[in-house]
Amino acid sequence: MTPRKPPAVPGRKVRPGTEEPRPDAFDVERVRAEFPVLGRTVYGKPLVYLDSAATAQKPRAVIDALARFYLEDNANIHRGVHYLSERATTAYEGCRDQVRAFLGARETCEIVFTHGTTESINLVASAWGRQNLGPGDEVLITGLEHHSNIVPWQLVCEATGATLKVVPITDAGEVRLKDFEQGLTARTRLVAVSHMSNALGTINPVREMTALAHARGVPILVDGAQAVAHLPVDVAALGCDFYAFSAHKIYGPTGIGVLYGRRDRLEAMSPYQGGGDMIESVTFARTTYAPLPGKFEAGTPNISGAIGLGEALRFVARIGLEAIARHEAELLEYATREVAAIDGVRLVGTAPHKAGILSFVLAGVHPHDIGTILDLEGVAIRVGHHCAQPIMDRFGLAATARASFAVYNTREDVDALVRAIHKVKEVFK
Ligand code: 7TS
């Protein structure tokens, strides 16, 4: 593909003969032109990147923002009185407010920067869990979780004597609300659920789950690692107590993520880590902590990462999550039809409400062999258990092949995937 000249408003088509953008139009080629890596080849073949659930590619605006920070403004934040430190602090805190707006949170102090979803969940498991869990208490998760939303709860349950309970999933890979409701008992102290499954693509009814949990006075954490890049999220409308995501899955850099926490919840929690920047005053006798969100951000944070995340959110806002969701839904529908039609393919995860992810197995071929042959065709997918081994166990599989879609993918990418799967079949005939 030859990248075209960047348009005035990337992602929007202009009607022939007018300068009026059509807000409903979405031009994937113009979006692709913003992602330098998509222009490269692998093994002499054009790259077909279908692994965005692992990490999304980055638009030039994000890459440039990172470089600009280090080229022009690099300094530590919150502690210097000098020009660069003030610029870096303003930029970092500005990104926090962008995240607040992106998530629909009420207050900027409810946004805590972390290393990513994994750290966000560990923060809550550790800081909230140690304070609030004891023997006989239950933490409720679902059978659809990534290891990041399982292991931190196992650790805190082990430390406190609480029990981890799991809501089962159906053959389609869904959590039924009535099963979820049954999982809530008088002993449930916290619910932790994924908004969207990374292994199957299923979208959980988190708003209804929140209402059910809250009706029993139980707080809920939502793992939004996959969801944020694919559907509009509004934490105030969801009503959840905590929401976690990673920048790198929404076109931002690695090493930075977010924990949204309702102010009263965060205020009641003790710090997760101690160190610089999270204190108000320190003596050897006693330390008092900084107000939110500083209390949870010990040490020098990922300053450039926050700035990159801010730029990524601007990129997403420019196109609009509704338009992104529409484009990806069409693509998923096409891919589902085309891949399911291949003799020997079985789709894993067939919930009616899903996004961006197509997991499958091919009769007689190990997923790792699928991945290797696809790779030689330039098609990048993920194979394995996807850090969700209990889901694989549920379906009696060790692994699946997983194609995942993002704003820059096309029907041609799907066609390349299908051609490459046929190649696998030829090799294993
Ligand atoms: N939760 C879900 C639902 C995820 O998909 C992931 C990462 C995480 C938590 C952890 O996010 P991190 O940024 O802290 O690592 N999922 C994947 C994946 O599907 N392939 O690679 C990483």
Image (cartoon, helix red, strand yellow):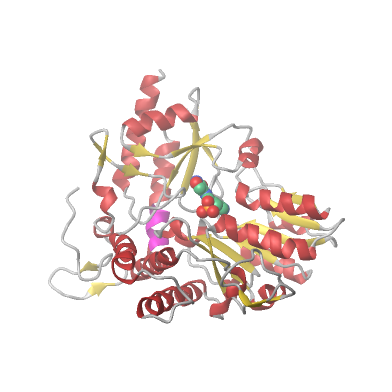
- Horizontal side of 30 relative to 326 (left or right) equals left
- The residue located at (42%, 32%) in the rendering is 371
Whether 133 is drawn above or below 310: the answer is: above
Quadrant for residue 309, please give it. bottom left
Whether 135 is drawn above or below 168: the answer is below
Q: Residue furthest top?
A: 429
* Count of residue discs: 0
Tell me if residue 119 is in the magenta stretch: no
Percent x, y for residue 233?
52, 68
On the image, the x and y values in percent for residue 342 come to: 42, 32
Residue at far front of view: 284
Q: Which of the pair 341/245 is nearer the observer?
A: 245
**Viewer can see residue 355:** yes
Q: In this orientation, which residue lies closer to the viewer: 351 or 233?
A: 233
Residue plotted at (27% across, 60% down) = 27
Q: Position of residue 86 (x, y in %)?
A: 40, 80
Residue at (61%, 46%) from the top-left corner?
Answer: 173
Q: Nearer the viewer, residue 340 or 314?
A: 314
**In front of the other: 314 or 25:** 314
> What residue span does the magenta drawing correspond to?
324-330
> Residue 202, can we see it?
no
User: In percent of the image, x 45 and y 73: which residue is there?
Assistant: 77
Residue 23 vs 418, above or below: the answer is below
Residue 85 screen position, x and y as percent:
40, 76
Dominant secondary-structure state across the stretch colored magenta:
helix
Q: Quadrant of the C terminus?
A: top left
Horizontal relation, residue 416 to residue 130: left or right: left
Judged from this view, the residue extending furthest toward the left is 17
**For residue 60, side relative to residue 363 (left or right):** left
